[in-house]
Amino acid sequence: MHYRSITDLADLLQQSLHRIPRETDLVVGLPGGGVLAANILCLLANVPMSDLESILAGRSFSVGRTKLDGGPAPQPQHVVAVADTAEGVAEARARLEAAGIAATLVVAYGDGPDVPGADLVLEALPEPRIFQWSFMQHPVLERACVDIDGVLCLDPTHAENDDGAAYLEFLTTARPLYRPVRRIGTLVTSRLEKYRAETEGWLAAQGIAYGRLAMLDLPSQAERIRLGAHGSFKAETYRKSDAPLFIESENRQARRIAELSGKPVLCLETHSLVTRETLARAPAAAPVPSTLGTAKAIARGLLGPARVAALKRRFAR
């Protein structure tokens, strides 16, 4: 499984800017992720942007360039049409050619270095693959394990997470976050089993379809915390399933799930794919120093230890 984030896409376009024809005077986003890629590319290249249907209909495409004068935007002489993948590229080329529009077809991520209908593939990225901008539309959802809090809805606040009346209110009024457009294979949550009715009610109200809902069968939040059962429960459920992917909101838990299950985890906190291989290459990050500690380190670097010590003596009086 390969994963690319929006940051990865922006970096790829930045690094590939020299490969885009210099005479380009309009960037066209093909449907789907191509519109996102075109938005980034038009800003990097400082040329206007349009979408496929607009340019084929002859509509205005003056948005996107920082104008240095007040004159009207000229008609484009060379178009670069951008897609995130090969899907629909051949059809787009045929439609542009039929309209008499000269265009270079660019695919950000192709199965290989060559894509039918494309002039340029920026990165060869074979299937299976998933992208930040479309992961909730991907067919893998139908077989995946997916967390609820932090993925389908916002996490409860500290005040809401009281295992009592405030938490019950949260369960019924939780604010939706990522919206799936497909049926999810298995929802795996560290919510307690006693809250199944409220959880199922919220999912139904949001129109979220799923095959199975796995919940933690413990008597209380305190017991869950005592056992540290969040990550281990999710990992065991995932390990026993045939799911090819787990989608988790929190980096620490994502790493734990990947470690215990031996299977890939998409972490939404870092927007990265966590696997045993990535864990081996990048051990857990050191704790983030406190704000006070950071301030002291900066002060020592700027003023030097002697002046910092003098200031401490002065303000200690």
Image (spheres, helix red, strand yellow):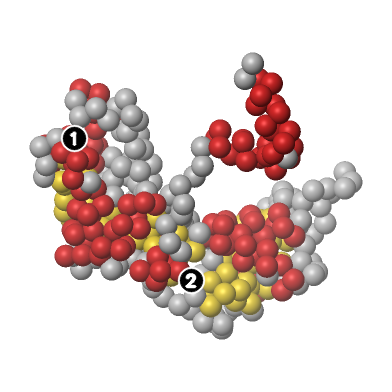
Tell me which residue sits at (23%, 37%) in the image: 202
Q: Give the residue drawn at x 54%, y 57%.
A: 6
The vertical placement of 279 against 224, above or below, is below
| Residue neighbourhood size for the residue with mark 2, other residues' Cα within 10 Å, grouped as few (<14), some (14–19), many (≥20) | some
Is residue 221 rendered to the left or right of residue 206? Answer: left
Q: Position of residue 62 (x, y in %)?
A: 74, 50
Which residue is at the front of the view, 237 or 212?
237
- Residue ID for mark 2: 87
- Callout 1 secondary element: helix
Q: Is residue 174 visible?
A: yes
- 57 with respect to 252 (left or right): right
Q: Nearer the viewer, residue 262 or 94?
A: 262
> Could you tell me if residue 140 is visible in this image?
no
Left/right of residue 39 with respect to residue 262 in the rendered view: right
Q: Which residue is mark 1?
A: 222
| Residue type beneath disc 1 | Ala
Is residue 126 left or right of 90 when viewed as pictured?
left
Q: Are discs 2 and 1 less than 8 Å apart at CB? A: no
In percent of width and height, residue 313 lies at 66, 24
Q: Tell me the number on the disc at residue 149.
A: none
